[in-house]
Amino acid sequence: MLRRLTKMAWYCSGSTNTELIDNLSKAGLIENERVIEAMIGVDRAHYAPSRPYSDSPQPIGHGATISAPHMHGHACEYLIDHLKPGARVLDIGSGSGYLTHVLANLVTDAANGRWGTVVGIDHIPELTDLARANMNKSQQGKEFQDSSAVQFITGDGRLGWKEGAPYNAIHVGAAAESLHSTLIDQLGAPGRLFIPVETENNGGPGEGQYIWVVDKKGDGSVQKEKVFQVSYVPLTDAPRG
Ligand SMILES: C[S@@+](CC[C@H](N)C(=O)[O-])C[C@H]1O[C@@H](n2cnc3c(N)ncnc32)[C@H](O)[C@@H]1O
């Protein structure tokens, strides 16, 4: 993973979506074939209003950003064993809706009639509206929403979304203060949580955030692993008004 993170972001830009993902793949930043295919299947220009084919975060309004595509790729690769056709997924901090769409591609095998379910949750209602509108820009995205394979919910993602649990995979797109049990409780067995955490065993304040991967095994036991250092915006209270 360290090898991947030392690559230069500009090196991986492209003039089309396919070129961007091909370049991320050639640079070794995304390696899994299913993830590559799922990301090629979602035009980032439908979700990022500026420089969509650049490997960097971009503003999407309301003080939020769409994350860099290499981070979305890493998240999918860490979750991939749990993203089988028919799986149930929760995407917390869904923002633009881009990753929610990629996750929907990963849990869908339309040719064999196997549809998973992906719930995107964000605490800013304008962003859940934006995500719905972004996804409706493609026929496939519209079908996902019309069939309820994808839903966007407005709410506090720190609480997860109990109504859709248990989930095979939970992705968190903003940093939690600590690795508390609420989201782990909503994982199926087996299930995996991918979450940036501010303080957990990080050596103290100012030592940076880390991605943690939490596995709930088939027997219900839980295993936690700190995997790599990151810099995400925090999960917060919803802005007032
Ligand atoms: C870095 S953005 C990632 C957005 C999304 N993954 C994307 O790439 O478009 C983080 C998102 O987390 C959302 N967020 C922050 N705190 C939240 C909370 N408590 N509950 C739900 N969403 C939250 C923000 O509104 C923002 O959309």
Image: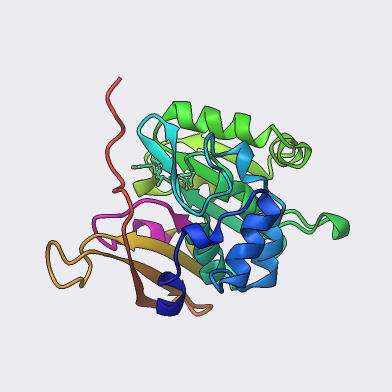
Observer able to see residue 189: no
Vertical relation: 183 (above or below) 15: below
Where residue 125 sits, quadrant-wise, is top left
Residue at (15% x, 73% y) in the render: 203
- Expressed as whole percent of the image width and height from the top left, the position of residue 109 reads 79, 59
Residue range (magenta):
169-185
Considering depth in this image, is 91 or 18 the residue closer to the camera?
A: 18
The x, y position of residue 49, in whole percent, is 54, 34
Was residue 154 drawn as part of the magenta stretch in this picture? no
Residue farthest right in this picture: 111
Q: Is residue 220 above or below residue 45?
A: below
In this rendering, the answer to whether 135 lies above or below 34 is above
- Up/down of 157 relative to 13, above or below: above
Ligand 1 rendered quadrant: top left
Quadrant placement of the C terminus? top left
Spot occupied by residue 132 in the image (x, y as percentages of width and height): 60, 32
Q: Which residue sits furthest left?
A: 205
* Residue at horizontal 61 percent and vertical 73 percent from the top: 31
Residue drawn at x 44%, y 79% is 3
* Left or right side of 129 for 157: left
Q: Looking at the figure, which quarter contains the N terminus?
A: bottom left
Question: Which of 211/224 is in front?
Answer: 211
> Which one is nearer the viewer's eye here, 158 or 11?
11
Q: Could you tell me which residue is drawn at 48 percent across and 57 percent down? A: 10
Q: Give how far across and how far down residue 2 sits, in percent.
A: 40, 78
Quarter occupied by residue 151: top right
